[in-house]
Amino acid sequence: MHRPRLSLLVASLLLASGIAGATPPVTTIPGTAVKTAERLRDKALHDDTGYRIVTSLTTEVGPRLAGSDADQRGRDWAIAKFKALGFDKVYTEPVTYPLWVRRSEHGAIVAPFPQALVLSALGYSAGTPKGGLTAQVVRFDSLDALKAAAPAAVKGKIVYIGYRMQRAKDGHDYGMGSAVRVTGPAIAASKGAAGYLLRSAGTDAHQRIAHTGVTDFEDPARAIPAAALSNPDADQLERILAMGKPVTVKLDLDCGVVGEYTGANVIGEITGRKYPDQVVAIGGHLDSWDPGTGAIDDGAGVAIAMAAGKLIGDLPRRPDRTIRVIAFANEEMGLWGGRAYAAKHADEVTKFQLGTESDFGAGPVWRMSASVKPGARDAIGQIAGVLAPLGVTYDVSKPGGGGSDLSQMHGKGMAALSLTQDGTHYFDWHHTSNDTLDKIDPKELAQNVAVYAAFSYMAAQADGDFGSATGAFAGDGAGE
Amino acid sequence: MHRPRLSLLVASLLLASGIAGATPPVTTIPGTAVKTAERLRDKALHDDTGYRIVTSLTTEVGPRLAGSDADQRGRDWAIAKFKALGFDKVYTEPVTYPLWVRRSEHGAIVAPFPQALVLSALGYSAGTPKGGLTAQVVRFDSLDALKAAAPAAVKGKIVYIGYRMQRAKDGHDYGMGSAVRVTGPAIAASKGAAGYLLRSAGTDAHQRIAHTGVTDFEDPARAIPAAALSNPDADQLERILAMGKPVTVKLDLDCGVVGEYTGANVIGEITGRKYPDQVVAIGGHLDSWDPGTGAIDDGAGVAIAMAAGKLIGDLPRRPDRTIRVIAFANEEMGLWGGRAYAAKHADEVTKFQLGTESDFGAGPVWRMSASVKPGARDAIGQIAGVLAPLGVTYDVSKPGGGGSDLSQMHGKGMAALSLTQDGTHYFDWHHTSNDTLDKIDPKELAQNVAVYAAFSYMAAQADGDFGSATGAFAGDGAGE
């Protein structure tokens, strides 16, 4: 049953020559592969490989800010770990990006009621002048209100936006939460603001812990100091602003872009027995924000993908296609690893059988969706059948996005899944010092490994492809 | 009914002359006073005075480390607030203590896996030498194990103890938690340790927030650098220690005793109509640790006592005895305000009708106990009857301790209650940056005000005393 059907061979040839319309109508997964996937799934549920990997990464490397000393240590760790786990091929591909550093950060209300503020500088934030930046705070209720503001109302001031992010299983409120963080600073800067503060894009309403994260200061010359306040600090600032007197804040941020850095995506492969150049691509990102140890974001993703690959590698024989596990570089400051990967591999997109990345914590996968060719829907249905006992529901109405970095490859045409995790508490800890190992439930992590191992194996054994073709899915969930 | 009974007059005269044995057998609270106390109780439950007070203190003053600039601002605030609330008499009494300052604090694992540690220097900790203190960590499982250790095992090392405090309604595990913090550093120092670390005496197992608190380095010359790790940081250190390789930590604490400071207890009184020199003493402490804004510890206590006094002051006429609300200075670094108060007022102990301080957060009061003369048990029973609808159970088997600072006056013989609050979550936030206003439930705070207003009023109106006499209760729950 592992002999490719004629139709698949024909389809592959046709795909390779760009005639996507001639792909076979139905891709299927052989019954023996389904059975093996079920065994993989059940074994993974009771296997602690994933948890041991994320324990090792977060303990032995700790925080892994892109471009920091720990970035190199993280890559060394990943190379060694792939090898120790028995991957057949381990290699790196360079990724170059601006090097942003955080040296120290302090903030305080100066008047009318002097007191310290807990904050965290945002990625690509400019530093403040020596001695700090002291300015009056001007509050806006929303990003739209800031957009509509006259520059005169903003010029020379520290803009503050207090959007309160709400918890949700699918984390959808991060859409607005992250928009306030990512796009707000540049909007404020364009109107002449001296600085920018936001209520953290996080759902831990009572923790004195700030959520960092990137901004879109693509041009460092236009960057201003920008930071996130913890939720209770935002409450305090708002209480004082509500009294109606001028409120002055001092920001003292020693951070900024100091040049360029070349890191790398680290890649491990379980080499396909029949079609070594056809790959199922899974992964997570190796970098993390610096305040935490990058356990849920995204040590978990790296561990899930590595463990899934390892379990497949432990089978008596190699899968038909290659399982490629990618530990991406610098996702946090703008999908640098994912974009570099897609740029380098765009031409080979038809070799990518199916792919998705885990980058939403360590909560259990509860939903699957897919962007594949119509003729592969049955195969996706077969995968869904194997995942259903894990509590995963197949939502046929949604596209598959491929996850964070692999969204870029999906944008080039790679057939992709979305494997949506329960993110109810993800934004309590995301991008904070609280992103530590204790937030991961080993059993929930094992459920993820079971999902990734089972789907990856089935995709690798499929009779037929999932429709990857240059441009096929452009705009279909890509970059979600 | 407000005319004092003959027996009371006689008793008062006898008490004043020190013949305690001649006190009347039974103290009672007149029925009209009980009715007024019930009305006070019910009004307080729907009154937001307490919440407004603690909001004002924590917002307008913020953190109030004893001896800091904010200490003076806190006193100014308290004086102004007492006056604004209509107290008849507002004054201060000086309190002198060593001035300990915290300038900055950093910690990191240097080897084998370099990464930052979240920690907080303990009160009276010495600073580290310029450039920090780097030393190997030696772990002990308990305070007893440290006590039993040979000096050679400790000398030149950083001692670490990882006691995990458990949550409890009555907070009893703080007994061991605080012992590890208070007494551990000096024990380690006496054996030649270079530094001391503990797992925070706190019950927030998953927050990257350290719990500071005092040590008993009474002699600064013998102090060593000492700090608390957040719970997840303690987990991380223990994981690395468990690998069996030497673990080196660097502490960089810029803190220490820099001289002496004279602050003050701030006192407000609702003056008694009949016996102005006889007082019901209630209070809280005005100082707080510096990382938070001192909301639950102890803005709440100050607010509860001030609001109770204010509600009594709002009655159509003044109570028979004086309600004295004391906002104590520097409780945190060793009951300095309470000890100064007791030293100054020990000779007047028989003038203290009954007293207790609120210093266990803002959870509802659920238990009352008392240390009073046998003849006042009926009156305590009457108070218990009024408090019962608030969910307060009278435990006749336990003594009353008077709370933190007022334990000192109880030690001099003041009749005292304990009004035990629900402290289930108190040690999640205690002595951390998380001690902020949002941790207070306005309704629960109001319940406390109801308890304090009702009991204080009844004690002020009692026909008879509660047995305060020099030495009468020495050792009976004092200092609990």
Image (spheres, coloured by chain):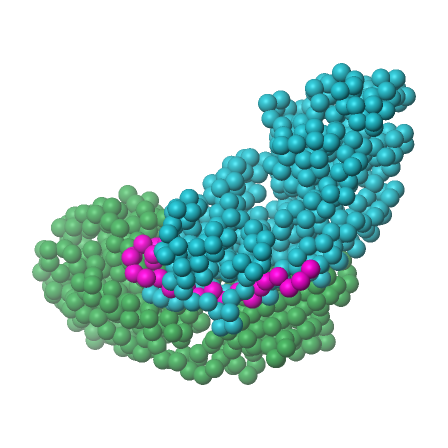
Chain colours: A green, B cyan
User: What's the magenta region?
Assistant: B238-260
Say which quadrant the N terminus of chain B sits in.
top right
Work out whether residue B324 can be spotted. yes
Q: Position of residue A197 (x, y in %)?
A: 61, 67
User: Which quarter of the figure is the C terminus of chain B placed in?
Assistant: top right
Q: Quadrant location of residue B474?
A: top right
Residue B140 lies, in percent from the top left, at 38, 50
Is residue A104 a member of the stretch shown in magenta?
A: no
Question: Is residue B241 shown above or below A255?
Answer: above
Residue A80: x %, y % from top left: 24, 67
Q: Is residue B422 left or right of residue A52?
A: right
Image height of B345 relative to A199, above or below? above
| Residue at 74% across, 56% down | B262
- Residue plotted at (33% across, 65% down): B112
Of B424 and A120, the residue lying toward us: B424
Q: Is residue A3 above or below residue A328?
A: above
Dividing the picture into quadrants, the one containing residue B274 is: top right
Residue shown at 44%/58% (left/top)? B192
| Left or right: A192, with A275 as reference point | right
